[in-house]
Image (tube, rainbow, N blue to C red):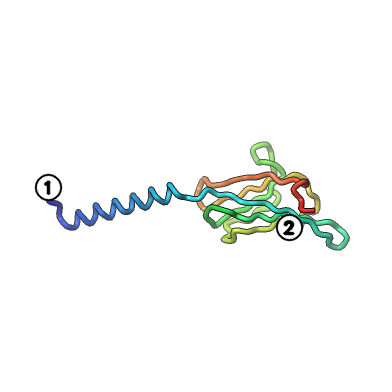
Amino acid sequence: MIKLPVNLKKAWLTAVIILFAVFFTTLHAQKLDFTIKTDSTIINGSKEYTITIKITSGKGPYSYYLCDKVPWVGGVVLQQYLDIQSSKYVFTRLTQFDNYVVFVKGSRKDEYIWKSVSARNEKK
């Protein structure tokens, strides 16, 4: 059996621990997800809508986007809020309630999710 120097043993053990930590973190990373709640109020005689986004899993900071439809079919970003630490965000001052698409991006490079929301989701 080959006897390794103490420094090499420590380096090997450190490498094994780091690889295990990376593997475990990747294996058990929470997938990004969120819930949507809609509401409306009357302000100065006009109805205004809000869309509340609450992150249920995933890691921040988060970027929030409200679009009229998905961007890959010509959707336009109506509101965006970037790199926010809070796991809850409210889109406000929506004067009409059509169909919207909400995108949320998490802290990982390719981590994002989108969901559509429509007037029929509005809290009565």
Label 2 sits on a secondary structure element that is: strand
Q: Amino acid at mark 2?
A: Thr
**How far from the left and from the top, in percent, is residue 54?**
63, 56
Label 1 sits on a secondary structure element that is: loop
Q: Which residue lies at the image location 76% right of the left edge and 55% below the top edge?
A: 39
- Dot 2 alpha-carbon crowd within 10 angstroms: few under 14, some 14 to 19, many 20 or more: some
Instruction: Look at discs 2 and 1 and give the one toward the viewer.
Output: 1
Q: Which of disc 1 and disc 2 is earlier in sequence? A: 1
**How far from the left and from the top, in percent, is residue 31?**
52, 48
Which residue is the site of mark 1? 2
User: Is residue 110 found left or right of 54 in the rendered image?
Assistant: left
**How far from the left and from the top, in percent, is residue 27?**
43, 47
- Numbered label attached to residue 92: 2
Q: Amino acid at mark 1?
A: Ile
Q: Which residue lies at the image location 76% right of the left edge and 51% below the top edge?
A: 122
**How far from the left and from the top, in percent, is residue 41?**
81, 59
- Numbered label attached to residue 114: none
Q: Which residue lies at the image location 34% right of the left edge and 50% below the top edge?
A: 20
User: Is residue 115 found left or right of 83 in the rendered image?
Assistant: right
Q: Which residue lies at the image location 47% right of the left edge and 50% below the top edge?
A: 29
